Structures are given as structure tokens and as C-alpha cells.
Image (cartoon, grey):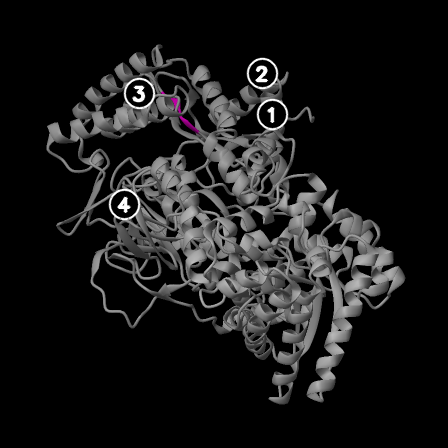
Amino acid sequence: MSSKYVYDFGGSSTDGGADMKNLLGGKGANMAEMSNLGIPVPPGFTITTEVCTHFMNNDDGYPDGLEKQVAASIARLEKEFGATFGDHDNPLLVSVRSGSRVSMPGMMDTVLNLGLNDSTVEGLISRTENPRFAYDSYRRFIQMYGNVVMGVHSELFEEKLGEARERAGVQVDNELSPKDLEALIEDYKAIVAKHADQPFPEDVKDQLYGSVAAVFHSWNSPRAISYRKMHSYPADWGTAVNVQTMVFGNMGDDCATGVAFTRDPSTGDKRFFGEYLVNAQGEDVVAGIRTPLPVDGAEGSLEHVMPEAYQELVKVYHRLEKHYRDMQDIEFTIQNGKLWMLQTRSGKRTGRAAVRIAVDMVHEGLIDEKTAMMRVEPEQLEQLLHPMVDPSVSATSIAHGLPASPGAASGHIVFSVEQALERTSKGEDVVLVRTETSPEDIDGMKVARAILTARGGMTSHAAVVARGMGKCCVAGCSELRIDYEAGTVTANGKTYHAGDEITVNGTSGHVFEGVLPTVKPTLDDYFRRFMEWADAARVLKVRTNADTPEDAENARAFGAEGIGLCRTEHMFFGEDRIDVVRQMILAEDTEERKEALAKILPMQRDDFVGVFGAMDGFPVTVRLLDPPLHEFLPSEPEDIDALAARLGEDRAELAAEIAALHESNPMLGHRGCRLGISYPEIYETQVRAIMEAACIVQRDGVEVMPEIMVPLVGIRGELAHLREKIVRVADEVLKEQGSRLDYLVGTMIEVPRAAIAAGRIAEYSDFFSFGTNDLTQLTFGFSRDDAQKFIETYIELGVMARDPFDTLDDLGVAELVRTAAEKGRATRPDIKLGICGEHGGDPESVRICHGIGLDYVSCSPFRVPIARLAAAQAALER
């Protein structure tokens, strides 16, 4: 650990810069960078992330030497600003803010106006001759410090504030008189004394170190932990603390505060986009307490109200965007007409905006194509594929707010995190409806299909977090009247209850009653151009997991280069065929089984005709029957009764047959290639259906490339035995049809033994497809479903870094893939290698696959663009 714990910025001394984010956090590094550029920044200092780590690891203790360094930096601020910290006559006030190395909007704590007490507030009145401002700052400080540091619920302060407005007969806080505010301060201090069991601290040094400790503790608050998990940020990063001289946007009508983006964060349009409030502090804008006004354009905008400050702000934002070569999210305060910059950072943006901004900046010469591709997170691309409300549907909006995050979704109304979690655990879709969201709502926001708030603007907590998550959001919907206690929301005179269904259109800002149909989005020229760059850069091919022609067509539209997994068992579950499949399973002998299979053959053949046709010119890997047979049979008594009646079977005998097929551990039982060896007629029928379909579409001019995959092989003899039968049937069909086409026979590597014995198995395999879902289960000895009971605990305790079912386990499972790849190629240099588990759509897993040297990954259709970009980034990184 370094012995330097404090870095100055602003004024006459700046120690850091933008390249020190790991040590100074994003906020501190960027404050230092703006200072170096000569941009007006209130002087301050940063306590490093190393101090946070020490604090957490040493029972909330600070390293030796910290207090001395902090005291020196405070002395510098006093000299720069001509005021003294804690002085009765001329007090220096500071803010204390968090600053992690990556943006985590609203997840950690902030304290403003620190340094006020019963003595210094009088000095502030004397210095400014503005008692309303001084008392307003003091009551804000008590509320913020009382909540953040002393743990007093904000609702208790808000309730008193509401009573004060009601007594004064005013609507908004800045209309309260000095006398109103002075009385409110006494109420606030009484709340603190009662609920914190101690008086509000008068000593400014205690205030400072109490706030620093609170910021450090907020790094491990439930909301911050949840946010870190969502984005896979390590817990040991810690947060820096920024202590900065206060500048005030709440001193009068020539003061303001605001948040802005150098481009539209929802659409990517190249336009200055922001909101501000006159006579307010920054938290008012992001918290949605008052409805903000636009920075530019309309009457009432900052451009019209404070034109000189606006022009200075425009010059600054142009300079910052050019310097950082990225869209910036900026915070500013105007005090008595003078502009001060409080923050700049790369702005959170939707997937559509990320792509457009990247493409535009290449054309503007700010960045090159490689930088553009590395700047867009692969997961963001999924947002571009989100549905929107069908424009042909006529529906009347029940409310309208700000289109804070695009897309459309429907769900049951919920008013709390608890309601959201309860309903989603039952498989229901929900819309989280709040007056305004706060960081405590993060878990509810995570599971909700959409977010709807009554207050807040385009830069509110709800808007910023929803855009980051890729969820549709409508904010600032002022027509809504929410009653949490009653569990109702009223919109334009009609009341809706928890559980009622609504549709939220985050693209237009409208809210509709009930569930409206949606349509697929169209992909624009920006997306196509961006993906052309990605495709040119990547080495890995990207296929899709698809079982129907519709899935295959969707995947082709998203750029899939074939099907890596077509699961034949999914074709068996239709109402028109499941009973025929059951007849096959329950057959008493081979001949009876073949009779049922003769009915199944044309069904499967028709399915393959559709899939092959949709994948014209691309390979299709078809997995032969994999799951154990009992999965196709009913288990509930009433369902067994119904099946017995339909098949004309004795109910007791049927129940006994079903019970006999049940397996105690079906994952390790009679399934996959084991079924094909026990009942060869099943695989023979499927191979015939595949090859007959291939011949049919070939005659129609389709270029067909079938790949027949045998599942669950662990022994060379299994594949040798089955390959002989597959080739025999396939060649018979080609001869019967008078056709010539190439086909491959391979296996899915999902048993650890198969990976170890891959060199021998490759003697009979044209390709390996790694089934990483089962390979992960069998390698760890975890059941995918049951493991969720403890994996989250493992991650919280640091036993595991990530869920191995979400991201490929690089040390164990991926090592088996590497081993199998090396041994397979040693035996058969031209063997084709890919993965078809869900990991194929996970960006980090794609990077691992690129490093191993696989030929392709396969994923669900809507993950195909994600995998394409992740593959490009993996190639560029290496």
C-alpha cells in the first residue's frame, strides 16, 4: 500500500489525472483531469481506494498518516477559498462523495454542505447576507448526514418537510421562508436525537470522518453489492472518497444546478441533452424531487434563462467530449452566474445509442473502428432487439411521461421490491411502479420487465439505471397518483391495483392499460455498419441454437452462420405428436416401437425441411434424442388417467410402466447415446428423417449441410457402434433418393471422460460440439437447478467469483475443453470444434473460446449479435 493517501485537485495544486482511476476512482481522476485542462473545478482532494480497502480489512481503521495528509489538504482548501473549516465567522463547507473506478449511479452515498452547525450557519448568513440559503443548506445537511451517516430514515425528514410546506401554504421547498426553515432545522435535530440515540454532531472534524466512513461502508451496502454482481465488478476494488469545496446552486435565482449529456443517451443523436433546476442543489435533479427543465431549446431552458453560463457550458462540453473522445455525462453548478464543473464521466447509454455514438465518432474522426468496437459492451446489443408496441394496434394511453429507456413491456403492477420478487418467483412479469426510484429499489428494478415513475427526469435514478440495464422505463409521469399503503395508482381518474396489468412504452413515454401486442424492432444502418466492422475483425464463427424454422429465420436475421444445436426432442412435445411419441416409448416390442416411429418419421422430416430451408447455405447440427424417456410421460394421476383413456390402455398397467421408466438420477441414467444403443430403431428413424429432408430441400435448390450429432458419448466404443449405423442409414437414403451431398457425424463432448479420451473418440468423429451446460454440471458435481440454492452464497463469500452456469469456468471446465480440442486435433487435424451450451452467448465465455481456438460458438437467436461482437473484441484484444 502506498504511503500517499490523499491527492489534491483544483485551484493551485493537482496531483492526479484521468489515467489514475484505479487509485482515485472515476470521479477523482476526472476532477483532476478537468483541473489539468483549466476547466473551472471547485478545489478538493481524493482519499484513495487503497484507504477503503485498508478500512474494510482493519475493523474500520484508517492507515497511519491519513489524518495528517487530510489536514494538509483541508488547509490548502482554506487558503484557496479564503474560508476556514469550522470557523464561526467565515466557514468553509465541503461535499463528501464516493468515487468508484467505474460509474455506479446512485449506488453509494454522498453528503453535501458538510461543516455546518449551529455556530457556522450564523457565519454563513453573515457572509452571504442570505439567511434562506444558509438555513436551507443546513436543513439539507442534517437530513443527508442523518440518513447516510447516522441511519435515520429519510421518510421521517420528508414527512416534516411536507408538514412545513403545508403550514406555509407553499408547493415547493425553495418557497419556504427563513423562519420556516429555522423551525424545520429544530425538528430535524429532534428526529436525529430520537432515532439515532445521539445528538447531531457539532464538531466539523467528526462530521468529516463520519461521512468518509459512511462512503466506505456504502461500498458494501446491499444495493451496491447487487449492482456489482449485475455488472461483475470485483468487491476488492473499493471506492475513493472525494472531499470538495462546496459551490451552491441554491443561493438564489442566479444560481442553478444540472446534469447533462454531450449526446442523447437514449438515441445517440448528436445533440446536447440535459436538465437543470434554478435555486437548487444537485441531488434535487437526480432524485426527481422537483421537475427539471431542459438545458437547451425551449423557453425556460438554461439557454434562455442564463445565456452566458449556458454558452460557457457548451464550450466546456465540446472540449470534454473532444478530449475524452466519448460521450460525457456532466454535472455542473452555477453560483451567482459563475459555472463550476462537478463531474465528467463516460455516460451510461442504451445499446442503440452506444452503437450510433460509436459509428458517428468514427465518421467524425474522433476514434477508429477498433476503438468503436471495444467501446460497446456486447450485452448492450440485446437492447436493440427488444420488442416495441405494435403500431397497428389502436390503444388509448392512460398516462404519459418521459421516454427514459426504450423498448416496450407488459406486466403486473408492483409497488415494492418485495412484491416484485414475490411475483417474479411465480413466473409472472411485473412492472415496478414508484413515485421515484432510489438505490434501495435495485433488486426490484433488476427483475421487473419495465419501470414507471411519477417523478424524475431523463437523468433521474430510474432513467439512468434502467438504461444501463436495458430495461424500458417511463419517468416523470406526473398524472400518476400512487398510494403505497392502499396498493393503488390512479391515472387520469382511474385507479389500478397491485396485480393489474399495464404496458409501458419506453420509446414514446406512454403507458397503456392491459397487455398490448408487440412487434420485433428493425435494425438500422448504424447497427448494420457496426456489425460489419465486428464481422471483419472476428475469427470465431457464430451459430445459433434453434429447433424450429422460425428460430432459424430469426437467427439468420441476426447474423447466425448456421445452427450449432437443433434439439430433436423439442420437436416431440407438440399436442399433435406427443401421444405418438408416448406410444413409441411404451411399446412392448421392437415391431410395435417401429410402428410408432413410422408415424413420427414424417413429422420429424417436415421439421427438418423447414430448418434446412431457413439455413440455406449454412451447416445445421442436429442432435439425436438426448433426454431420458420418462420425461415425455405424464407424472400427475389425472394426466395418467387421460393418457390411458386416449391410448385405450389399462390405467394401472400404464401407471406401472411409467413408474418402471422413472430414473433416480436421470442425468446419469438411460439417456443420450445409451438410448440409441438400447433402441437403435429410434436413432435410425431420426437419421432417415434428417437425410430425407436434406434430399428434399436440395432438389428445391437449397444448399444443405447436415451434421448429425450423437449426445453423451464418454466411451469410444459408443460412438464407433453408433457411427456405423448412422452412416449405413444415411447412405441408404442417399442411394434411394438418387442424391449426393456431404454430411458429417460427430459427438457432443459433455462427459469429462470424453474430454480426457478425446483423442480416441476423434477417430470416429468429424466434429466435437461441447455441451458446456452438462459438462459444467458433471465437472463440478452441481445440479444446475439445485446449485442455485448455494451458488449465490458462494459468490457473496468469495468462494467463487462467478456462477459457472453463466460464465464458463476457465480453470476447470474450460481446461477440459482445451484438453479435448488439443487431443481431438492431434488425431484429426481437420476436426471441427464448437460449443453449443448457453455459454455461447456470454461475452466472457466467448473470449475464452477464442483463446482456446474453437471454430465457432452457438447461442440462442437473440444472443447472436452479442456473440458476434464479443468474438470481434476477443480477436482485437489478442
Q: Mark 4 points at which residue?
A: 499
| Residue 18 seen in the current view | yes
Callout 4, which amino acid? Gly
Indicate whether 299 appears above or below 753.
Answer: below
Question: Mark 4 vs mark 1: which is more N-terminal?
Answer: 1
Indicate whether 628 appears above or below 767.
Answer: above
Callout 3, which amino acid? Val
Distance Cα–Cα, label 2 vs label 4: 45 Å
Indicate whether 263 appears above or below 54.
Answer: below
> Which label number is shown at residue 51?
1
Q: What element carries label 2?
A: loop
Callout 2, which amino acid? Asp
Write the residue at 43% across / 64% down. Answer: 269
Q: Do the residues labelled 2 and 1 touch (CB within 8 Å)?
A: no
Question: Mark 2 vs mark 1: which is more N-terminal?
Answer: 1
Write the residue at 42% across / 17% down. Answer: 204
Q: Is residue 554 magenta?
A: no
Residue 427, image x, y percentages: 40, 47
Question: Mark 3 vs mark 1: which is more N-terminal?
Answer: 1
Indicate whether 280 appears above or below 464.
Answer: above
**Tag in front: 2 or 4:** 4
* Quarter assignment of residue 830: bottom right
Q: Name the residue under label 2.
A: 59
Distance Cα–Cα, label 3 vs label 1: 31 Å
776 or 295, which lies in front? Answer: 776
Q: Name the residue under label 3.
A: 121
Which contiguous range is marked in magenta?
90-95
Distance Cα–Cα, label 4 vs label 1: 47 Å
Callout 1, which amino acid? Val
Distance Cα–Cα, label 3 vs label 4: 49 Å
**Tag in front: 4 or 1:** 4
